[in-house]
Image (cartoon, rainbow, N blue to C red):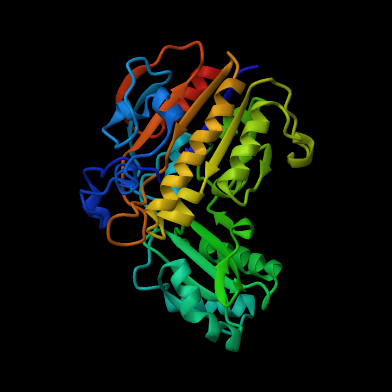
Amino acid sequence: MKRAIIVVIDSMGIGAMDDCKDFNDIPECNTLKHVCEFNNGLKVPNLSKLGLGNIQDFLGIEKTEKPLAQYGTMIEKSKGKDTTTGHWEFTGLVLDKPFATFPEGFPSELIEKFIKETNCGGILANKPASGTAIIEELNEEHHKTKFPIVYTSADSVFQIALDTDLIPLETLYEWCEIARRILDEGNYNVSRVIARPYKVIDGKPTRISKDRRDYSMVPPKETLLNEIKNKSGKVIAIGKIEDIFSKAGITHAIHTGSNKEGLELTLKAIKNELELDKIAYPNIKCHNDFSLIFTNLVDTDMLYGHRNNAKGYGDAIEEIDRYLTEILPALNDDDLLIITADHGCDPCVPGTDHTREKVPVLIYNRKTNGKNLGTLVGFDHVAKFVKEWIF
């Protein structure tokens, strides 16, 4: 049974792309390099053995004369530095134009339509903001008015935050679905609507990661995922993959509340211990043996990159490496493991937004010799590697 496993370490970029200034980033940004330096090196023996340290000089990540994996650097073709753009390009969909961003907030006609169709009474914020900062800033007013907090960032996102002890989580999801429809009908070209639920815990507004949901645009063309599904293979989405692709091309899906949960589910999927019947989409026929396990590990980005927490970022990478101690031996001769990232989010440079960066790629099969792939232009090389492997 041929299987491919893609594990995306969200935002673990490895250096600015040549056009980074077009995205308001500095040439010095390098997420992994700076995380390594901040932590005086990382303990990642498995990633080192695979060849991560051979790609570039990263403090504490050792080089190896006999890397287990093929290793290299990928440069994004699409004009973006967001999750959707990166993941879509992994699956062969290169965007001709970037998603729209709203540095001055969303236009009044859009907000007015959102207020009318949700019957929410009004909104707070309507500006670019850090998600943790905006809920602290506006929590008191949110409780007085019961208006949702609507904000954006440097990325193409329409984010809605509210306290789910004040307004039900189901209402938040409903409002997100309405926002998604309004944006699509108005051709606003917004990549994602994101539900950002929080609760006040010990007096502090705290986001509830497990209940976050992303409502992405439907991919405009079929991707690698559709190709596998159309050929009756399995596409098992772990984490926010289901949301990123708006369910297109997915056969099985399960959300996660943390990297730990995502890694444990990935390990179960590899060991064929995941209860697929419980996470299968209805009326899906998977006759063929080949499959894709596609995992997004979001904590590096959401909890640490955006919050300028280089210590937490380093701890998260080390946690991933510890799980590789179990994951690598669980793989069989017919498994291809691809570890990569979708953009940068350097916690050590000014700002809290994504950074336009190159990404690492490690491609491992226990019967294949490791080698240097050099620099690959296009994240869509991932789709090429997977198709060559499973078809």
Out of 261 and 345, give the one closest to the viewer. 261
Q: Is residue 209 above or below residue 222?
A: below
Out of 330 and 76, give the one closest to the viewer. 330
Residue 77 in the image: x percent, y percent?
33, 39
The image quadrant where one finds the N terminus is top right
Q: Residue 99 falls in which quadrant of the image? A: bottom left
Residue 43 in the image: x percent, y percent?
41, 36
The residue shown at (25%, 58%) is: 24
The residue shown at (41%, 46%) is: 314
Residue 92 in the image: x percent, y percent?
45, 34
Left/right of residue 200 with respect to residue 105 in the rendered view:
right
Out of 292 and 246, give the one closest to the viewer. 292
Left/right of residue 328 with respect to residue 157 in the rendered view:
right
Number of labelled discs?
0
Q: Is residue 341 above or below residue 113?
A: above
Q: Residue furthest bottom?
A: 144
Q: Is residue 327 above or below residue 277?
A: above
Q: Residue 195 falls in which quadrant of the image? A: bottom right
**Observer able to see residue 10:** no
The image quadrant where one finds the C terminus is top right
Residue 312 in the image: x percent, y percent?
44, 52
Left/right of residue 261 with respect to residue 34 in the rendered view:
right
Out of 9 and 101, give the one closest to the viewer. 9
**Observer able to see residue 204:** yes
The residue shown at (61%, 72%) is: 201
